[in-house]
Image (tube, rainbow, N blue to C red):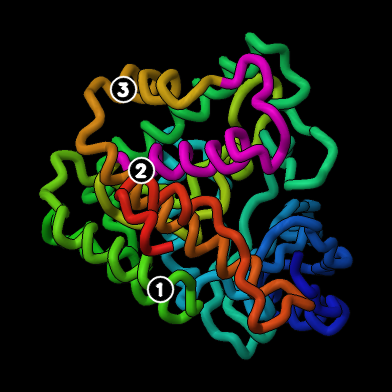
Amino acid sequence: MVERTDPVEKRARLEAWLRTKLPHAEDLALSPLDKAAGGFGSEIHFIDLKWRERGEEKTLRLVMREEPVVLRVFPEYNIAAEFHTMRCLENTGIPVPKMYWLEEDKDVIGVPFYVMERIDGEVLDPQQPGEEPMGPLYEATPEGRGKIFRQAIEVIAKINSVNWKSLEIPCLPAPKSGIEALDRHIAFYEGMAKWAAVEPRALIDAALEWFKKNRFEPKHVGLCWGDARLGNLMYREGRVVGVLDWDMVHTSAAESDLAWLLAVDWLSQDVGLRGPRWDGVPDREEIMRCYESVAGRSLENFFYHEAFAMLRLGIIFWRVIKAMPGIPPDFAPDVPPLRKLANMLKMEDKL
């Protein structure tokens, strides 16, 4: 989905940079950069690093993730918050990769980037619209799919329940209240909708006004993964081993992540972007009950969060389609999440 850069010069620059991070390394050698095929924005490379240190041979299998340049889904990125969030979660029991180095100086390779451990496993649900079914979720039995989904929900609930204040995550501002957390989230997507020129404008404006008017003080403000979906989980030998893609990380009402998971599930399954719902994949009500069971509490004001997730998904859907190569500037894509939002808020006249 992303126009990839020529990695030859990038590799030379990266190798020189790595020498500064490993000053005692001898005979340091970096493998050719292996570009990941997926991703809508960030350019991702797999790399192997070998060196000798005090007579001992050392090897690291790494992933380099860069701030997007060619296809910027969001108007602003906080790559430092991604890095520091994962680093701060390393000892919490949440399965994140080990984080090695962050570089915010774009002069090193052209963009800010970070380097992390490469996790062995498969993406739990890698299927994109139009592709043949694949991945551990598809290959599992109906019973196995239910167990996989429960694992995913357990991970999300654990992220939402972590004591994020004690982690003091750098570059991730802590809200003073739950209302401030909601206000920040609303303001970000209001700005993004203007930046991406999302249509229909009447619906976007009316919906944003509704969210501002109906905002409330959440009882449970927590760390939110942001892009909470099965396609961002690594899976190996029957368990989730990696939580990836933290470019939407934020602090807000804990229900935000579950609402996003359900919105993405609705788009892929109920709208049918990848075909009929597979046997064993739980429906909306089952997923909600599972989250409540794992979290040990009832969901609060969930209609608000589900509606806002549809707004977020609709804005992102519009931006991704409009930013694709070859799309005419005047093309107005059909955006199912915005139609769903209009139905939820009884604003069909704004479409």
Give the distance between the C-alpha atoms of the residues marked 2 and 1, in whole angstroms.
20 Å
Q: Looking at the figure, which quarter contains the C terminus?
A: bottom left
Q: Secondary structure at mark 3?
A: helix
Mark identifier at residue 292: 3
Q: Is residue 262 magenta?
A: yes
Which residue carries the number 1 mark? 201
Q: Nearer the viewer, mark 1 or mark 3?
A: 1
Label 1: element kind? helix
Residue 21 in view of the camera:
no
Rendered image: mark on residue 159: none
Instruction: Classify mark 2: residues with Cα within 10 Å, few (<14), some (14-19) or many (20+).
Output: many
Describe the element under mark 2 as helix, strand or loop.
Answer: helix
For the N terminus, which image quadrant? Answer: bottom right
* Residue 262 vertical placement versus 293 (above, below): below
233 and 209: which is toward the camera: 209
Q: Position of residue 332 (x, y in %)?
A: 61, 71
Could you classify mark 3 by the number of other residues whose Cα lies within 10 Å: few (under 14), some (14-19), or many (20 or more)? some
The amino acid pointed to by label 1 is Arg
Amino acid at pointer 2: Glu
Image check: 309 left or right of 329? left
Q: Residue furthest bottom?
A: 107
- 345 is within the stretch colored magenta: no
Q: Which amino acid is tagged 3? A: Glu
Question: Does residue 59 appear left or right of residue 293 in this picture?
Answer: right
Above or below residue 157? Residue 127 is below
Picture residue at 44% right of the left edge, 44% below the top: 260
Which stretch is magenta?
A: 255-281
Measured from the top left, where is residue 8 in percent x and y?
88, 79
